[in-house]
């Protein structure tokens, strides 16, 4: 998918929300450990320098501060209001706040879209109020937010004592996501935002703000849904221009996870493949769990330069254990992490400094001698870094918190050696514990002081390196990606036909495809056996017979296909047998005609299709085709539209891509023609997105190179389909 056209950004400022000068707490309470008390106490503890105005009808003070009976009695109109009240009181309170001159609010209350129809109605009313008054709101159904840089806490939970100011901004639909990341005590934070339902200000708008916020260097997103993909893409472009990576964990990707996510935030979760495609298209570093997120954050926050991007580039790893290097090889092979073989020059340099029993390889075992003589370690690390294909150098070292005093002292010297080398080479350097049980503070202190990434867990760290390479490759070309073109592909007659919603027969589906430039088989309709015989004579044997019915989508399941019919006698037998089978399996199906089709021999069977992928529109899918498509489940998805180069990347992501190249002596298939078909199909998906639900071309015969492709079977489902 090319980069989406930018959504029109709003002109409203988030400053009153994320950096207010004065704050009213509506629903402030003198009772400890309540939402209204926590909000005031957090502001006091955080040292907020602006006006703090607890509002309570009868209390004289809250958390040691003077309380006010109502908004009207405040000495000034506060920038922001914290609303610590139940859902039924939120709207009238916000009306009053807006009238008083409040410009932003944080709404803690649940009871909105996440609870069902009545909650969705209440949330729509909240959105309408904000549209009318100009209020910007965090929430509802959230913990609130913290601006750590400017000591502002609009937060209903306890802010961890371990939080310190730094370069990471966390924005999460889930309050638990905020808590999980903020309590790791590994990263300094600039902002912590529990967005909740994000009814008014969503992830995209937070990205746009944080792109221009000087204290933020990296953004972590814990996402349950996406409301406006085009706006999110615009936010990502702002982040790229600012040089700030975005690491995202999307939850709700499984069927049960999606149901839990919908129940949690009242939003529809899109498919895992669609989100992965959108993230890939827009340069988001996507992770699958909090461990992966933590290590990608550790790398992105401290890595001093991006790895070089060129063919053959990969990670070079140094260790002092043969067992560790063997384990890392196993994990890297499973994950597809590239560890390039060393050049002759790098190997020569290594053999000059390694003990005689050492082996020059990647990953490198520098041997136990390097623990006690770190000049060996440094020389080995520099030799490894000298290889032109080693674009990132990583030191693998067990350094869990349970190390003895002697062990931690030995391994601290290795960490110091890593720091020394990082100062002398012009490639990114990282250090990681092969286990994920934490990092010994004495060992990693020199790394933290110097700003060398200190990571943990072999699998999560290797994945972080892999994603750093992918991100660097994206950034090398993202500005040259074309905006999604406006399409003129649509034809009024076909828009009208699809809008009618009635099922397409195969012949009608192929007529649609042919009208849009896709190559389909030659075929003729027949209403009886004699017409079928005449059609076969005209097309030339061998032929294929297919049932033609708007009520049958998968013809093979009811015996509605007969192939390789060689002559008239075989056709008569096939005709009678097919009709009998279909009537037996689908007695209520409307059967008026049969389709006589040329028999396409040879080639590789692929599937090509379109499917609706909310909230992104249509996706194009390809992979292994034929009757076993659901059993094999070899498929890759991209968001529409794509060009032929992107189609080639999509095909290469499937196992079937190897078949097209010519597997085990088979002739190479016409991959170029198939990629052209995918690009044309994706353009159809983009053009007809408002009236099209799905397209299934299975199989598509990809003939030997130079002979093109043919769509052998086609299914089209209109968006508002009926059964008439």
Image (cartoon, rainbow, N blue to C red):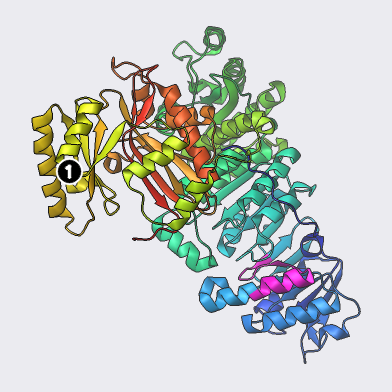
- Assign the C terminus to one quadrant of the image: bottom left
Residue 402 seen: no
Residue 26 location (% of width, % of height) = 75, 80
Residue 79 versus residue 517: which sits nearer the camera? 517
Does residue 39 sit above or below 557 in this rendering? below
Identify which residue, 659 or 42, lies in the foreground: 659
Is the residue 588 above or below the residue 671 in the image? below
On the picture, is 297 further left or further right than 569? right
* Residue toward you, 516 or 717: 516
The x and y percentages for residue 318 are 53, 25
Question: Which residue does the numbered mark 1 point to in the structure image?
Answer: 528
Say whether residue 705 is magenta. no
For the N terminus, which image quadrant? top right
Query: Within the image, what quadrant is residue 484 found in?
Result: top right
Up the image or down, 353 lies above or below 452; here it is above
Task: Check disc 1: other Cα within 10 Å, few if <14, some if 14-19, many if 20+.
Answer: few
Disc count in the image?
1
Residue 183 in sight from this viewpoint: yes
Residue at the spot 62% in from the left edge and 55% down from the top edge: 228
Task: Report the magenta residues as a range.
Answer: 125-144
Does the magenta segment cover residue 139?
yes
Instruction: Report whether 303 appears left or right of 114.
Output: right
Q: What residue is drawn where x is 43% and y is 30%?
A: 651
- Residue at (28, 36) in percent of width and height: 524
Question: In the visual, does 219 lie left or right of 176?
Answer: right
Percent across and percent down for residue 100 are 85, 79
């Amino acid at each position: 998918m090319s980069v989406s056209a930018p959504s029109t950004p709003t002109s409203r400022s988030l400053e009153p929300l994320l950096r207010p000068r004065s704050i009213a707490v509506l629903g402030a309470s003198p009772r400890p450990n309540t939402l209204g008390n926590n909000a005031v106490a957090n502001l006091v503890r955080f040292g907020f320098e602006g006006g703090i105005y607890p509002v309570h009808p009868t209390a004289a003070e809250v958390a040691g501060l003077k309380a006010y009976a109502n908004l009207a009695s405040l000495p000034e109109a506060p920038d922001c209001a914290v609303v610590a009240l139940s859902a039924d009181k939120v709207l009238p309170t916000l009306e009053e706040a807006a009238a008083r001159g409040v410009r932003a609010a944080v709404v803690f209350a649940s009871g909105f879209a996440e609870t069902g129809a009545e909650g969705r109605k209440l949330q729509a009313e909240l959105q309408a109020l904000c549209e009318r008054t100009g209020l910007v709101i965090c929430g509802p159904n959230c913990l609130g937010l913290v601006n750590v840089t400017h000591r502002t806490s609009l937060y209903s939970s306890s802010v961890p004592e371990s939080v310190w100011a730094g370069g990471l901004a966390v924005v999460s639909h889930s309050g638990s996501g905020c808590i999980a990341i903020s309590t790791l005590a590994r990263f300094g934070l600039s902002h912590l935002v529990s967005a909740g339902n994000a009814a008014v200000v969503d992830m995209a708008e937070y990205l746009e703000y944080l792109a221009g916020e000087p204290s933020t260097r990296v953004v972590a997103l814990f996402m349950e849904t996406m409301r406006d993909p085009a706006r999110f893409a615009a936010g990502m472009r702002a982040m790229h221009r600012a040089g700030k990576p975005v690491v995202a964990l999307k939850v709700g990707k499984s069927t049960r996870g999606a149901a839990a996510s919908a129940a949690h935030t009242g939003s529809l979760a899109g498919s895992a493949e669609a989100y992965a495609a959108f993230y890939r298209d827009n340069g988001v570093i996507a992770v699958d769990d909090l461990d992966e997120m933590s290590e990608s954050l550790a790398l992105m926050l401290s890595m001093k330069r991006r790895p070089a991007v060129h063919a053959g580039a990969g990670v070079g790893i140094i260790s002092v254990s043969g067992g560790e290097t063997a384990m890392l090889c196993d994990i890297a092979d499973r994950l597809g992490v590239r560890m390039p073989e060393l050049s002759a020059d790098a190997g020569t340099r290594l053999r000059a400094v390694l003990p005689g029993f050492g082996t020059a390889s990647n990953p490198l075992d520098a041997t136990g001698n390097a623990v006690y003589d770190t000049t060996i370690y440094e020389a080995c690390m520099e030799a490894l870094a000298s290889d032109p294909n080693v674009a990132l150098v990583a030191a693998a070292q067990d350094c869990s918190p349970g190390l003895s005093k002697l062990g931690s002292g030995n391994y601290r010297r290795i960490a110091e050696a890593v720091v020394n080398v990082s100062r002398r080479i012009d490639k990114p350097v990282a250090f990681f514990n092969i286990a994920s049980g934490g990092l010994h503070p004495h060992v990693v202190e020199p790394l933290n002081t110097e700003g060398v990434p200190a990571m943990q867990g072999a699998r999560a760290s290797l994945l972080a390196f892999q994603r750093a390479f992918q991100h660097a490759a994206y950034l090398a070309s993202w500005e040259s990606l074309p905006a999604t073109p406006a399409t003129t592909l649509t034809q009024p007659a076909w828009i009208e036909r699809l809008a009618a919603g009635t099922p397409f027969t195969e012949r009608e589906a192929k007529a649609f495809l042919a009208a849009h430039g896709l190559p389909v088989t030659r075929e003729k309709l027949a209403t009886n056996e004699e017409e079928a015989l005449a059609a076969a004579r005209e097309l030339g044997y061998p032929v294929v017979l297919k049932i033609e019915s708007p009520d049958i989508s998968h013809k093979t399941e009811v015996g509605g296909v007969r192939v390789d019919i060689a002559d008239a006698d075989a056709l008569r037998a096939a005709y009678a047998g097919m009709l009998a089978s279909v009537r037996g399996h689908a007695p209520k199906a409307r059967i008026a005609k049969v389709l006589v089709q040329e028999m396409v021999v040879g080639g590789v069977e692929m599937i090509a299709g379109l499917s609706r992928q909310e909230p992104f529109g249509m996706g194009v899918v390809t992979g292994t085709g034929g009757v076993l498509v659901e059993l094999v489940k070899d498929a890759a998805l991209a968001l529409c539209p794509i060009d032929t180069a992107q189609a080639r990347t999509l095909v290469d992501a499937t196992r079937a891509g190897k078949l097209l190249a010519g597997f085990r002596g088979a002739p190479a298939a016409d991959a170029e023609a198939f990629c052209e078909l995918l690009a044309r199909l994706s353009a159809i998906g983009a053009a007809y997105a408002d009236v099209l639900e799905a397209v299934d071309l299975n199989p598509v015969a990809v003939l030997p190179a130079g002979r093109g492709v043919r769509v052998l079977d086609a299914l089209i489902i209109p968006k508002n389909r009926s059964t008439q």
